[in-house]
Every structure is written in structure tokens, then in C-alpha cells.
Image (cartoon, rainbow, N blue to C red):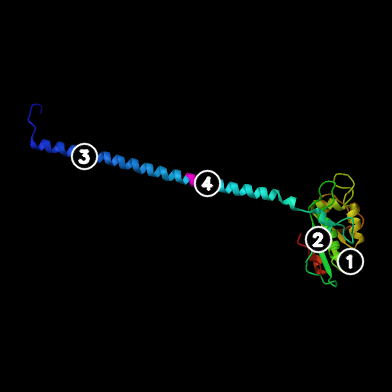
Amino acid sequence: MLGQPVTRRDTSALADLASLTPAAGEQEQANSGWRLNVELERQTRRDDMLRYSSTIMAFALIMLVLNSGAPALADPARFGPGPAIEEFGAIAEVEGATPIDPTTQFRIAFDVSEPADENAVSRRLESAARFINMHVAAGVPADNIQLAIVVHGRAVHDVSTPAEDGAANANAPLIEALIAHGVEIFVCGQSAAYYDVETEDLLPGVEMALSAMTAHALLQQDGYTLNPF
């Protein structure tokens, strides 16, 4: 009440209230410090992630530069005509290669489904010519090399005439050279039917099989091993 004297009890209460004020301030200061520490930790994590991302990007850039420069290391000048099929299947001499017994007998089947680039010779078909040239150059008689090629998918157009676009088939001279060296070429009948290629459309010497699976199965029973690429 106004006008009443302050008692000892009132003085004690005021003292207790005053003692609480600094404690509240200290708590607020502690909370501010905690929030600051949390924010510093978050910023540190963000900085670490940024440095990590920068390192990854730098590594990727280095690899890109190295890979883009890889073709410059190729040396086509080391490749030249082979001794059996000079027009196709260029080869390189390999010093220190393991010698091959000249009595070795090769019976290899090639699987070709990837079509050639437009108006270009099929690199997959040409692999057979390269195989013959490499091994004849290594001392294996041509008569000891028996090859077969199984063609399916869109690659059926590489062994038929006319070519898919109606132009002359760029692979015709290669096919003629391969067949002249005893290479058997089989076309998947199922792929031929899908792409409207008839038996009479095949290049001379190319044979129509029931399917690519059938041709491979029969070749394996006849002792042929499948070339892995």
C-alpha cells in the first residue's frame, strides 16, 4: 500500500528479484554462444563440401584432358598391308610377341551385328581379314586358318546388294576377298526376314542360315571357337 513503510520482508524480496536478472542475461548469452557455434560448424561443413567438390571437378578435368589426348598417341604409320589380303586388314609388327607354332590350326567364328558407317567398310567384317594377315605374317600357313562370320541385326545390309540406302555396297570387295580366302559368311535368316533381305539379295558367296543362333551352334559343334570381339 502507498504510504506504508518498507518492511524487512519486502527488502528481501526485492533483493531476490535483483539477483535473478543477471542469471537471465547469462542464459541468453550462453544461448547466443551455442547458436554461434552451430552456425560455425555448419559453415565449416559447407566449406569442406566445397573443397571436396572442387577436388572432384579438378580430377575429372584432368582425366578429360588426358583422355582427349589419347588419340594423339596412336601411330597409324606402324600398320601396313598384310601378306594374304593386301587390300584389307592392315596389321602392325609386334616385337617380342610370343611365337606361334606354325602347325597351329585355327577354327574361329566371328559375330557381327553392328552395321558399318555409311558408305564405309565394316570394321567388324574386316577383323577377319586382319586375323588372317596377322597369323600368316606370324608363320601360320593360310590353309591352317578356317574362319566363319555370322552376320545378324542391321549388319545384314553390309553383305547384301543393294546397300540399305540403295547405293553400291562398299563391303562388296571385302566380302569377295574373304570368300576367296575360304572364309564362310552366314546371314541370320530371322534378321534377314525382319529387314526384308531375301536370299537372292545376298552378295555372291554369302549363305543364308535359319538363324544366327543356329549358325553359331553348328559352328561350335564343328570345332569353331567364338572370337570375343
The tag earlier along the polypeptide, 1 or 2, is 2
What amino acid is labelled 4 in the image?
Arg
Q: Nearer the viewer, mark 4 or mark 2?
A: 4
Tell me the CA gap for discs 3 and 2. 92 Å
Which residue is rendered at x = 60% and y = 49% of the image? 59
Q: At numbered mark 3, what does the secondary structure look like: helix, strand or loop?
A: helix
**Left or right: 75 as drawn, with respect to 11:** right
Residue 220's quadrant in the figure? bottom right
| Magenta part, dominant SS | helix
Q: Label for residue 110?
A: 2
Q: Residues within 10 Å of mark 4 (few under 14, many from 20)?
A: few
Q: Quadrant of the N terminus?
A: top left
Q: At numbered mark 1, what does the secondary structure look like: helix, strand or loop?
A: helix
Which residue is rendered at x = 7% and y = 30% of the image? 5
The tag earlier along the polypeptide, 1 or 4, is 4
Tell me the CA gap for discs 1 and 2. 17 Å
Tell me the CA gap for discs 1 and 4. 61 Å
Q: Which x, y percent locates residue 124?
A: 81, 55
Q: At numbered mark 2, what does the secondary structure look like: helix, strand or loop?
A: strand
Q: Which portion, as a residue range, is magenta?
A: 46-50
Tell me the CA gap for discs 4 and 2. 50 Å
Q: At numbered mark 4, what does the secondary structure look like: helix, strand or loop?
A: helix
Q: Nearer the viewer, mark 1 or mark 4?
A: 4
State the residue position of label 1.
Answer: 142
- The foreground one among 12 and 193 is 12
Tell me the CA gap for discs 1 and 3. 105 Å
Tell me the CA gap for discs 3 and 4. 47 Å
State the residue position of label 3.
Answer: 20
State the residue position of label 4.
Answer: 51
What amino acid is labelled 1 in the image?
Ala
Dots 1 and 2: beta carbons under 8 Å?
Answer: no
